[in-house]
Amino acid sequence: ESQLIIKERQQTTFQVEELINLLDGGKEKTALRRSIEQTILSDPLMKTDKIGYLTREQKYVQSVRRMMYFFTDLAKRNKWNIEDPHCPEMLFLSRSLSSVVAFMIHMGAFVPSISSFGTLEQVSKWQPLAKECLIIGCYAQTELGHGTNLRRLETTSTFDRNTQEFIVNTPNLSSMKWWPGDMGKSANHAMVMAQLITNGENHGMQAFIVPIRDMTTHKPLPGVEVGNIGSIMSLEDTDNGYLRLNNVRIPKENMLAKYANVDRSGRFQQTGNNRLMYASMMNLRIVLTREQMIHALQKACTIAARYSCVRKQGSLTPNGPEIPIMDYVTQQNKVIPRIALAYALDFTIMEVRHRYVQFLADVTRGDLSNMAEMHAISSGIKANASERTVAGVETLRRACGGHGYSMASGLPYLLLSVTGSCTYEGENTVLYLQVARYLIKTAANISMGKSVDGSSAYLAENTEARCSATSQEEFYDHSLLDACFKHRSKQLLQSVAMDLQGLLAEGKQQMEAWNLLSIQLVNSAKAHIERYIVATSASFVRKLNCSLKVKKLLNQLCSLVALHQITNFPGDFLKDGYLDSHQLDLARKAEVKLLQSLRHNVVGLVDAFDFRDEILGSCIGAYDGNAYERLYDYAKNDVMNKNDVHEESYQYLRPHLHRG
Ligand SMILES: Cc1cc2nc3c(=O)[nH]c(=O)nc-3n(C[C@H](O)[C@H](O)[C@H](O)COP(=O)(O)OP(=O)(O)OC[C@H]3O[C@@H](n4cnc5c(N)ncnc54)[C@H](O)[C@@H]3O)c2cc1C
Ligand SMILES: *[C@@H]1O[C@H](CO)[C@@H](O)[C@H](O)[C@H]1NC(C)=O
Ligand SMILES: *[C@@H]1O[C@H](CO)[C@@H](O)[C@H](O)[C@H]1NC(C)=O
Ligand SMILES: *[C@@H]1O[C@H](CO)[C@@H](O)[C@H](O)[C@H]1NC(C)=O
Ligand SMILES: *[C@@H]1O[C@H](CO)[C@@H](O)[C@H](O)[C@H]1NC(C)=O
């Protein structure tokens, strides 16, 4: 174990275990998580080869083998309730599985969409098959030509009254399904989103279960062409596929009919409020935000923080001893705000999950009043978390210098896999524009004197025109910081709402005006969500029942998240004179002081994320701090070094070398 990292741990001012329990949701949860991790990581059949050594095909095959064993054997033996996205095991499982895995879409989207869209009868028919992996499904929505604009999807499902069947077609190139995970080589069933056509009339998008491969030979069924879409940036084990359907007939019962059905004569009937469907699908976005984004940021923080404490480079006195790079304030400014953010986002998403559970209970009672707000929050948090995670992981990767560029650091892998999250489950800009739509409606309600509550209540409050801070210390105060963020968000919204009014008054069409102002609209949505993160994480910490030491530390992290934003993007805070340049200087000084006071807890803070070395997958970020030994070991084991002479390259070198 590196002496440097031992020294870091001796400086830690709090009990790391307390913070670990807090992030897990209690002591018992930590114990449960660790026992799950132990079961998975000690099972030889679950072993993953080191990242960076496998080809794309090997990754896919390994992933299929591992996950089939996991679902049909390991999880069952341990009675893990894997198909219930709310069960505590599920939250910990995805963490333990470290790298991306196969059948995420099968379990995470196909299975839950059956209960979201299906009648009780359909759920009881399909769900047991899917849960037992007797069928493998995918969620086939996106097409080659359309993703975001769902209304223009071109796949059709036409009712044939004579045979009581649907005929499913992807009539041309742009209509073929493109991207669905698990679809290319693994799935034998697809949840196909298609335009429902009965008696010549189009009734819009509905979900259909379409068998695509033969259950014994696994060959594509007649009329079906299916394959993998080819090499992608990362996440290759997810088997993203394409699918063409040519007059594929499915029985009438395969249209999922919880909210709409077709009778024998082809008459279409809406039977329920399909907004309920969106309510149940929001969960996936919340779950993914934590599992795919926040966990990735926490891992990157762990790697960069530990490495920065064992990496020595340069000194602070002429000819003095070399110091760990973590002692440089610029390095602290790269690493510590990302750690703070990782905490703030985690606290925020815990709160969002909590609110979502309440929201679902309301919805079940028929109360849909919080739908718009819940949608805005879950979309906005997803967009913000994914974008910031990608930016944060890249900052942390560069903070590790040359070794951050090596796959051995684990950082390139994190970066490449998490960058996809800006696109899937809603393209981020599109999501922000949806948040903006909600905000513009809220602004209209406010101007009509209607009451607003929940996360946007502040938009109707009066705020000071200027920030009152006169000292550095005041910039640690959560309510002062919150006031800055409230003011900025309010002001951005008011200004874009006024511009919108202006353009409409000039006679511009609504959609054209919206497009002209969309950059401002996105900024306004970002400001609202940032304020939500700043306020929610701070109030989460306020309510925590924990030791004073931990509370103080977490309060500092929350202040840092807000301060870092103000000092790095001061424009909107300065614009209307809410902050002046003197106050900005105070905020900058406050931030540097905060970084320094957090410095000696850096390793403790990332140890509290409690990622085992196997899950971290990094040669430079392991718990014991022995970075160089592991890097050397990694190089020695590389496939290129199997033999001292690389026969194939030598074949080209030899004629030239031997000429002289
Ligand atoms: C790793 C990965 C896994 C995926 N898995 C699945 C899956 O399992 N099943 C599935 O069905 N799909 C899947 N997808 C597809 C994914 O859902 C879509 O790619 C995503 O919804 C974005 O849609 P798009 O590709 O059409 O982008 P586009 O909508 O074409 O976006 C391109 C650009 O246009 C902009 N834009 C589009 N519309 C607007 C607008 N109204 N206003 C302003 N700007 C706009 C966007 O902001 C973006 O900058 C996956 C994608 C990836 C990358
Ligand atoms: C695909 O077919 C649909 C409907 O038949 C049509 O509207 C669309 O323009 C076609 N697209 C292309 C690229 O041919
Ligand atoms: C605006 O007010 C209407 C009517 O009171 C309400 O139904 C709607 O949800 C409100 N919209 C927002 C975004 O608050
Ligand atoms: C996300 O929110 C944070 C502040 O909470 C802010 O620093 C950042 O710019 C936001 N990013 C995006 C892309 O919205
Ligand atoms: C806070 O935690 C302590 C010790 O864990 C416990 O005794 C106390 O009841 C808790 N208080 C609240 C308000 O939950």
Image (cartoon, rainbow, N blue to C red):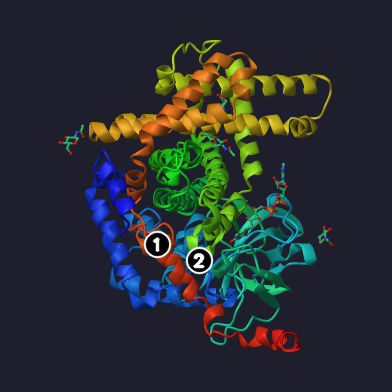
* Pick the front one: 237 or 122: 237
Residue 264 falls in image quadrant: bottom right
Q: How far apart are the two marked residues, 2 and 1, measured between alpha carbons?
A: 23 Å
Vertical position of residue 646 compared to residue 604: above or below: below
State the mark number for residue 106.
2
State the mark number for residue 230.
none
**Tags 2 and 1 touching, CB below 8 Å:** no
- Reading the image, the residue beneath label 1 is 615
In the image, taking residue 385 as reference, residue 518 lies left or right, namely right
* Residue sitting at x 70%, y 60%: 143
In the image, taking residue 610 as reference, residue 316 lies left or right, namely right
Picture coordinates of residue 20 (x, y %)? 29, 47
Picture coordinates of residue 352 (x, y %)? 43, 40
* Residue sitting at x 56%, y 64%: 235
Amino acid type, label 2: His
Q: Residues within 10 Å of mark 1 (few under 14, many from 20)?
A: some
Marks 2 and 1, the one that precedes in the sequence = 2
Amino acid type, label 1: Ile
Q: Residue furthest front?
A: 319
* Pick the front one: 1 or 160: 1
Residue 201 falls in image quadrant: bottom right
Q: Is mark 2 within 8 Å of ligand 1?
A: no
> Which part of the image, by quadrant, shows the C terminus?
bottom right
Q: Residues within 10 Å of mark 2 (few under 14, many from 20)?
A: many
Q: Nearer the viewer, mark 2 or mark 1?
A: 1
Residue 364 falls in image quadrant: top left
> Which part of the image, by quadrant, shows the N terminus?
bottom left
